[in-house]
Image: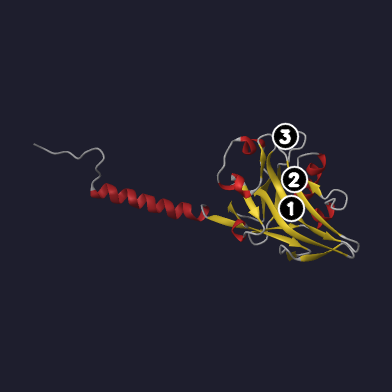
Amino acid sequence: MSMSALPWELNTFEAMKRVTHFLFGLVLIAPWEIWAQLNLRVLYRLAPITLGKRLPFNSNDSIQLDQLKFYIGTKDEKVHFFDLEDSLTHTLILHQPEDSTLLYFGMDSLANTQGRLDGPFDPLLGMYWAWNTGYIQIKISGVLWTSIQSFPFEYHLGGYRHPYITHYQKMVSLHNRTVHLSLEGFLSALPIQDQPKIMMPGPRAWTLYQHFVSSFP
């Protein structure tokens, strides 16, 4: 009685051939399939920002940031949570980094409403508003000191519904796989003395968010 190999059994030659093809494929694919990290640095007047440290602001004033959190993304990681206090959040996934890349700012309406509660969507990160307002796209707080008095400030900027959608795409320049966020213009645009708190979507929050996006060259 002759015995034939079962369909799922491969002889030694066939197995070796398949392994060879697989390894050859890795050699061909690997150089083009390297996943790289994109570093994100937050700067003020070309220097890295440290939370809780006073910075010169305008002529005789100073400003201090106590919190900076926001959502950003790449084509390979559409929603990434950044927290200046947590260095583990300062890198994004980017495939084939070049001299420039497309970044995603904030979340689109689908990301805001799909009901996910894991990773960057975790409400414990303190970025979730409610079902009808979605997620805070940037949260920044601190203190402005003038020659007269101090002004604590806090801004929760976001919105995914027309006409105050805070979701943008923008090509930005890279320097050694690093993208820089320069906060001078954004901080100057904050209406700290007139309106030190904005906590909901609206026209002024929408305008300030555009200043934030413009901080990426």
Residue 111 spot, x, y in % from top left: 62, 39
Q: Does the CB distance between marks 3 and 1 fall below 8 Å?
A: no
Q: Is residue 175 left or right of residue 114?
A: right
Residue 139 appears in view: yes
Q: Secondary structure at mark 2?
A: strand
Extreme residue in the front direction: 149
Foreground: disc 2 or disc 3:
2
Q: Which residue is mark 3?
A: 161
The correct choice, above or below, for 134 with respect to 176 in the image is: above
Q: Secondary structure at mark 3?
A: loop
The correct choice, above or below, for 132 with respect to 174 in the image is: above
Q: 36 and 123: which one is in front?
A: 123
Q: CA distance from mark 2 to mark 3?
A: 13 Å
Q: Does the CB distance between marks 1 and 2 fall below 8 Å?
A: yes
Q: Residues within 10 Å of mark 1 (few under 14, many from 20)?
A: some
Determine the residue positioned at 37% across, 50% down: 21
Task: Give the amino acid at mark 3.
Answer: Arg
Task: Give the amino acid at mark 2.
Answer: Leu
The correct choice, above or below, for 3 with respect to 80 in the image is: above
Quarter of the image holding residue 180?
Answer: bottom right
**Residue 140: numbered disc:** 1
Q: Secondary structure at mark 1?
A: strand
Determine the residue positioned at 68% across, 50% down: 70
Determine the residue positioned at 25% across, 49% down: 13
